[in-house]
Image: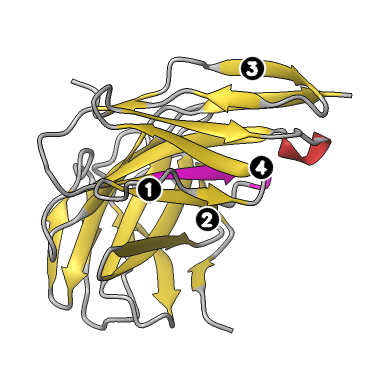
């Protein structure tokens, strides 16, 4: 079974509009964390935002926010006021495992294209 | 500046040869990881290591080997047993401080078999 599922292979969004990228996860751990990374065409992985499983508030970082719904096991990324530079691949990832034996598992990604 | 350095950026290998990809970090992180990314795909975990002289297989370890002799270094060897080694390889390191967990990536190595 997939640990991280991203159901949107590609999305096209008009510049300045908000966009939501979907991510659902599957784990039986009580302690885990969820990440979003951006990967431009250069290939580097840019950290965007992190949400711990015990965090009660949704994480926010500038224009990025993470809509964390624990009961639904979803961790959607919301980008407000999209910009042309937001065009890239976006990956959702989950940290699981106990301290000292943790690993990151990634979804298959969503390619976001911002239209001027 | 602190960070993760992968070298080389581009690597060409003849079929049947072993090659080693370098990953060095000066972030004092305990955990390090190797991922493989194929075009248009997500990242798949090859190997990971939480401490020196110890490492675990990830989801696609066959045809790869690693070592962790120093905290700062986690080289990946792509052996001739790896049937389809052409891919983009990413190294990462992570640390945890109480409830904060952070993971950082290198710039990647693009390996092509010729």
Q: Look at mark 3 in the image and give the residue it sits on.
A: A11
Label of residue A66 in the image? none
Evaluate whether residue B85 shows in this view.
Answer: no
Chief SS of the magenta region: strand
Q: What whole-number distance in Å separates the C-alpha atoms at marks 1 and 4?
A: 22 Å
The mark closer to the camera, 2 or 4, is: 4
Q: Secondary structure at mark 4?
A: loop
Q: Is residue A26 above or below residue A85?
A: above
When asked about the image quadrant of residue B70, the answer is bottom left
Q: What x and y, as percent, mark residue B71?
A: 27, 81
Q: Secondary structure at mark 1?
A: strand
Q: What whole-number distance in Å separates the C-alpha atoms at marks 1 and 2?
A: 25 Å
Q: What x and y, as percent, mark residue A24?
A: 34, 24
The subunit letter for the residue under badge 4 reads A
Check the image and name the residue furthest to the front.
Answer: A56
Q: Are marks 4 and 3 on the same chain?
A: yes
Q: Is residue A114 above or below residue B98?
A: above
Q: Which residue: 26% across, 75% down?
A: B30
Is disc 3 in contact with disc 2, using a CB cutoff of under 8 Å? no
């Amino acid at each position: 079974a997939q640990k991280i599922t991203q159901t949107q292979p590609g999305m096209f969004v008009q510049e300045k509009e908000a966009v939501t990228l979907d991510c659902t996860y599957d784990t039986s751990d009580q302690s885990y964390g969820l990440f979003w990374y951006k990967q431009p065409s250069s290939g580097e992985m840019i950290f965007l935002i992190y949400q711990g499983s015990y965090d009660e508030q949704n994480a926010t970082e500038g224009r990025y926010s993470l809509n964390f719904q624990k009961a639904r096991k979803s961790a959607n990324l919301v980008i407000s006021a999209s910009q042309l530079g937001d065009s890239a691949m976006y990956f959702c990832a989950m940290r699981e495992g106990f301290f000292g034996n943790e690993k990151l598992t990634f979804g298959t990604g969503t390619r976001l294209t911002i239209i001027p | 500046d602190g960070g993760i350095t992968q070298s080389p950026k581009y690597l060409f290998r003849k079929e049947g040869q072993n090659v080693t990809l370098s990953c060095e970090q000066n972030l004092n992180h305990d955990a390090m990881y190797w991922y493989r990314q194929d075009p248009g795909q997500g990242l798949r975990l090859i190997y990971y290591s939480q401490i020196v002289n110890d490492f675990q297989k990830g989801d696609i370890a066959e045809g790869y080997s690693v070592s962790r002799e120093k905290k700062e270094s986690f080289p990946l060897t792509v052996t001739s047993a790896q049937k389809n080694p052409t891919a983009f390889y990413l190294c990462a390191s992570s640390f945890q401080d109480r409830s904060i967990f952070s993971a950082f990536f290198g710039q990647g190595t693009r390996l092509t078999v010729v």
